[in-house]
Every structure is written in C-alpha cells, then in structure tokens.
Amino acid sequence: MNIPHSNHLVGWIGDDFTGSAASLEVLAFAGIPSVLFLSVPSKAQMELFPKAQAIGVATTARSQSPDWMQLHLPEYFKFLKDLSPVISHYKVCSTLDSSPEIGSIGCALDIAQSIFNSPWIPVLIAAPKMGRYQIFGHLFAASGSQVYRLDRHPTMRNHPITPMQESDVAKHLMLQSTHKIHNLRLDSLSGKRADFATLPIATGGQVVTLDAVTDQDMARLGKFIWQTGQNGLFAIGSQGIQYALVEHWRENGLIETQDRCVSAGPVEQVICVSGSVSPQTSDQINWALKNGFQGLSVDVRSVLLIPQEASKDIVVRALDILASGRSLIIYTADGRKGFEPELSAGESSKIGQILGHILKQLLKQTHIRRVIISGGDTSGHASQQLDLFAVQAISPTVPGAPLLKAFSTDPDLDGLELALKGGQMGTVDYFDWIKRGGGMTEKG
C-alpha cells in the first residue's frame, strides 16, 4: 500500500454487526490493515492493533429506537471524531433497512452532523459488487438472478420490522431526518462534469445521495469522496463507501490490484444459530439439512415466555447432536408459510440475545471453534453475549459475509472463528462453505 497519508484512512460506526464486518472485509482483503471492535475500545484494546489503518465499531442501532440512538450514538461518533480518520463513515445496510421508528438512518445523520459538522455528507448505498444499484436516486437490489426496485423487492417490501415502501433514497431518509437531501445523478460523473471541485454539492453542508451502477462509477465516486475528505469528511452508506475508495486507490496504483483471498481450512464441525426469516436463509438451512447438518428448531414463543427453561432444554438437545459428530443449525424460522414468527423489534432482539447465550454455553462445553450467526439483527445481539471485543477478517466467501477471527479476554473464546451472515447473504451452500473454511469459489 502506498497511500500518502499516515495514521487512519477510514473509520466507521456500523448500525449492525453483519454490515460492520462487510466494511471490514472490503478493506482487509484489499490489503489495508483493519480491525472491527464490538464496542468502543479501550486504549489497551486499541494498542493490540498498532498497524490498523482502518478501524470500525459495530452497534445494534439498526434494531433500536431514536431514543436509544440519542442516548448511545454520541459516544460512538465522538470516538470516531477523536480517531480523526480521513473518512468517517456511518455504515448502514445496503438495502436501507430503517424507518422513523426503528434503525433511523436520518436520526443517526442528525446526531452525527451535530458532532462532525462535515462540509458535505455523501450518501452512497449502492454496491454493484453486491448487486446493489442506484440510478436517478432510486435503489435497486438483486434477489437471486433478478434485480428489483427496492419497494418491489420480494424480501425487503415484506421485511418483518422495516418493510421498504420507498425506493427513492433521499425521500426515504427525509422521512427520518431534519436535513434536506439531494441526489447526484449518474450523468454528473462523466465527461467534463467529472471535475468534482466545481460541483455545487462540494460546499454548503448538503447531504447528497450518489448514483452508481458499475465499478467505474464507484471509482469516480471514490475519487470524489477521497479528494473532498482530505480535510475530514463524514459519510453515510453501505460498504459501497469502502468499495468506492478501494476502486479509486487501485485505479491510481495506491494499493494492490487483486484481493487477498485465502481459505482458513476445513473443520469437522460448526455450530450455526439463525434468527433470520429470509427466504434465502431458508434455502440455506434446507440445503444444509440435506447435506449432513442436523437441525434443531426453536419454539420462539416458549423461549420468550420461559427463556431459562427453554434455553436449558435446547442446550441439552444440542449437546446430544454435537456429541454425534454432526454440525448443528439452531433456527427460529425456516421459510415455511406460517412458520415465521411475527415479532416486535424488542422480541426479535431478545431472541438474538437468547441464541447468543445458548451458543456461548455450547462453545464452553465443546471443543468447537467455528460458528455462524445468521440474521442481521440476530448477529449483533447474539455476538454481544460471547464476550468478544474485536474481529479481523481471515477468509472471504460471497461479498458481505466473510469468515472472521475473534479476540476475547476469555481464553475459551479467544481465537474463535465466526461468520456473521445477513439474511439475504450467501449461496445456498453457505453453511458448508464456512465449514470448509471460506475462500473463493471455483467461479472466483
């Protein structure tokens, strides 16, 4: 790496754990020393990663109320401001999961700008490498082989907590924020108009959503963000922020042209806990159950009503399965009609915490050291039960769901390998892929 800047290049606060790890992945596999903390780190924890040039902190903001954000996010943003990276980034989901009541990106924007007072705020949700595209201000997302406008996306329009009814990113966010938000059209990035310094959005504190459809678009946006960020810049976006910067750095020969992609190697057993209700996760669970994994279905209502008794029963049954040598999936939903529980945001968070508590007990009572947590909100609430304080990316899979190495003061959990998978992420054989150690597919 030959980027002419010392100390920290990028710092980010993630609104969930899976997305935070996705930003980590983009930078780490591009050769930039990176670490993700699972809460605001202490000085001693920071000193364990002296070479890190990109630092993130994961939160559960995506499943929280504006009141929670007002109480907690200032601490995270002040940490980021004190870190003083070139680019400060509030990382949000690439499918814009949020509403005025839950996971409000607009509320986070208002809090952050009161702290950073950024000259302007780019909003880059698009990430073409992940099948996320924005054009004329509207967000599109892939599902399988098809691409849908966000408000017509088969999963996102039916999301159990934050169903998407608006594809215009600026309009969606203005329902949540006090700021006026504009869009920079794709045709503004080509030809003579690509002289970013002359564009009116470069000054005045405006919030601007950015169109992108190709990697070339992302490289132009990366240049735009990097050049205007040299005096400090706050940005909002998916891991598209990191993709854009990496595309720009590569185009200018500042970092290697190829990702660093290795396999962590296979293990005999893995444990997966899943709170996702996504049809894609359903397909992954059903594939795994037909290919050597054992499933353990969780009665969600029983777990919520009598958590201690239900959890104890699940642990006993799980240990019996693991003793047989098989890998295990503990799941709350499998995609069958009528099987997905209708939960409030608070109940969903509680389920994630209970799954994390169960997972910790299983890890303490077995020698298994590779796990998967499936579900965006589940990943955050479950991970917080595992006494981990940081992770680094060690092996890729599909974009957005890498295999990670965890750090803990608990010797039984230090070095744990885990994958945090959003509901819509991963191939049908994803769970077995993690068991094999990640790494790129034969297709690349």
Image (cartoon, rainbow, N blue to C red):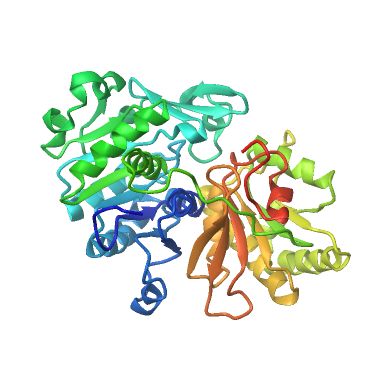
Residue 104 vertical position relative to residue 328 in the rendered view, above or below: above
Q: Nearer the viewer, residue 355 or 8?
A: 8
Query: Where in the figure is residue 326, as x and y percent of width and height?
Result: 84, 59
Q: Is residue 33 left or right of residue 5?
A: right
Q: Nearer the viewer, residue 338 or 218?
A: 218
Q: Is residue 119 left or right of residue 188?
A: left
Residue 367 in view (yes/no): yes
Q: Is residue 357 left or right of residue 368?
A: left
Give me the residue at 33% from left, 47% from top: 254
Residue 145 vertical position relative to residue 420 in the rendered view, above or below: above
Q: Quadrant of the C terminus?
A: top right
Q: Nearer the viewer, residue 204 or 61?
A: 204
Query: Where in the figure is residue 30, as x and y percent of width and height?
Result: 44, 50
Res 101 quadrant in image: top left
Res 142 quadrant in image: top right
Query: Where in the figure is residue 203, as x and y percent of width and height?
Result: 11, 37
Give me the residue at 30% from left, 30% from top: 210
Residue 192 vertical position relative to residue 414 in the rendered view, above or below: above
Q: Is residue 136 left or right of residue 348?
A: left
Residue 339 in view (yes/no): no
Give me the residue at 24% from left, 48% from top: 234
Q: Quadrant of the N terminus?
A: bottom left
Q: How many marks?
A: 0
Query: Where in the figure is residue 333, as x and y percent of width and height?
Result: 70, 45
